Amino acid sequence: MRQIQFGVRVPNSGPLAAKQNIVKATKHAEETGFDSVWVHDHVVWSSERHRHHISSGAAEALSDAQDANFFEALTTLAYLAAETQRIQLGVACLVLPCRNPVYAAKQCATLDWLCDGRLVVGVGLGSKATRESSEFDVFGVPLKGRGFRTDEYIKAMKAVWTQPVASFEGKNLSFKNAEVFPKPVQKPHPPVWVGGWMDQAAVRAGRYGEGWIPGWLSPEEMKRGRELLTQAAKDKGRDPTKITVAVEKLAAIARTRDDAMRVALPTIRTSTNSYERDVDNIQFALDRHIIGSVDDVRRRCDEFVENGVQHFELKLIYPSMESMLEQMTLWSKEIIPHYD
């Protein structure tokens, strides 16, 4: 296993979301040597979010005739389990407060069997996009206390995965003597990666996670978050070196910086005010993501690696599937071997 790993988000949402595109991107990722493919999660979405929060594809691919398709994360990964052999399958991240944790634990355990133990379970509180698409309201889940609820749900899921007859007692959820099978292939359970860029997310990962996967943080901010994670893990008697530090990054790569910027900037401008961090200027985004020529991308990846990052989930910006596959091929030839 490579020390530094690379994964790519496939289009389970956005203007190019379609079964054939999800499969095409996944197969190409496996063929070209990526370590993982990722989907993301929202059950409730909206046409407004579809137009202004582009996490797969690019603004140029939008059209007025499109539905706000957002294919359910775990169902999509189950389909991909049958289409792949080697590559890890991840979700970043399940909006955990809106999921029943017992049911989610059973889904993930089943999925871990279907993919022969290749699952990574990212979990999060829900982002600005979650709030603005009214997801919490639809599920009748209070926004207040969602952090504590998430902590409880992580612990409840791990109880289901590891206890033959599972019990859990919490403020938001309690159950006794629940026999839930199958248990996951991975022992003791699939790795749980905590999403979120705020300090508390790093602390949560240190306390309860096997990984941390934030988005909008610079290399220097990643270093600070890793320090918070390390201390939180030690305070819980856990080994911080066993917790994967990952990042989720918008990305565009081309032979020249100008070509990469032409691909990336329209989408960043379209989505500026819809991300979980309000972006006052384009430079703020460029300082936190990975966009440019091969040399630019290598330098930026090195900056993240020097500050503790071990796994990159790339949200490539691509106006067409051809563009996505070309960028993945270039990344596989010029960036991945840099870390072999």
Image: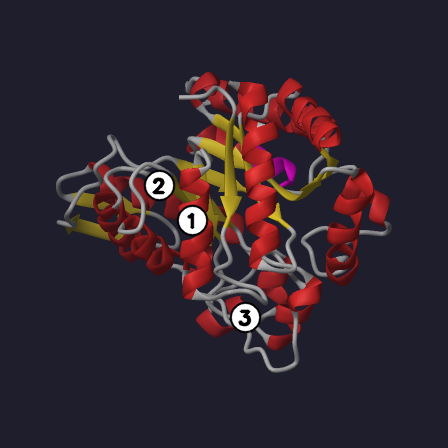
The mark nearer the N terminus, 3 or 2, is 3
Disc 1 and disc 3: Cα gap in Å?
23 Å
Mark 3 vs 2: CB contact within 8 A:
no
* Residue under pointer 2: 155
Q: Secondary structure at mark 1?
A: helix
> Horizontal and vertical percent for residue 208?
43, 33
| Principal secondary structure, stretch drawn in magenta | helix
* Residue under pointer 3: 45
> Horizontal and vertical percent for residue 274?
71, 61
Mark 1 vs 3: CB contact within 8 A:
no
The mark nearer the N terminus, 2 or 1, is 1
Residue at x 79% of width, y 37% of height: 287
| Residue 70 in sight in this render | yes
**Which amino acid lies under the numbered mark 1 shown in the image of this protein?**
Thr
**Mark 3 Cα-neighbour bin, 10 Å: few <14, some 14–19, many ≥20:** some
Residue 142 vs residue 20: left or right?
right
Q: Secondary structure at mark 2?
A: helix
Disc 2 and disc 1: Cα gap in Å?
31 Å
Q: Residue furthest bottom?
A: 65
Residue 61 vs residue 260: left or right?
left
Q: Quadrant of residue 203?
A: top right
Disc 3 and disc 2: Cα gap in Å?
27 Å
Q: Give the magenta range.
A: 197-202
Q: Is residue 192 above or below residue 174?
A: above
Front residue of 4/245: it is: 4
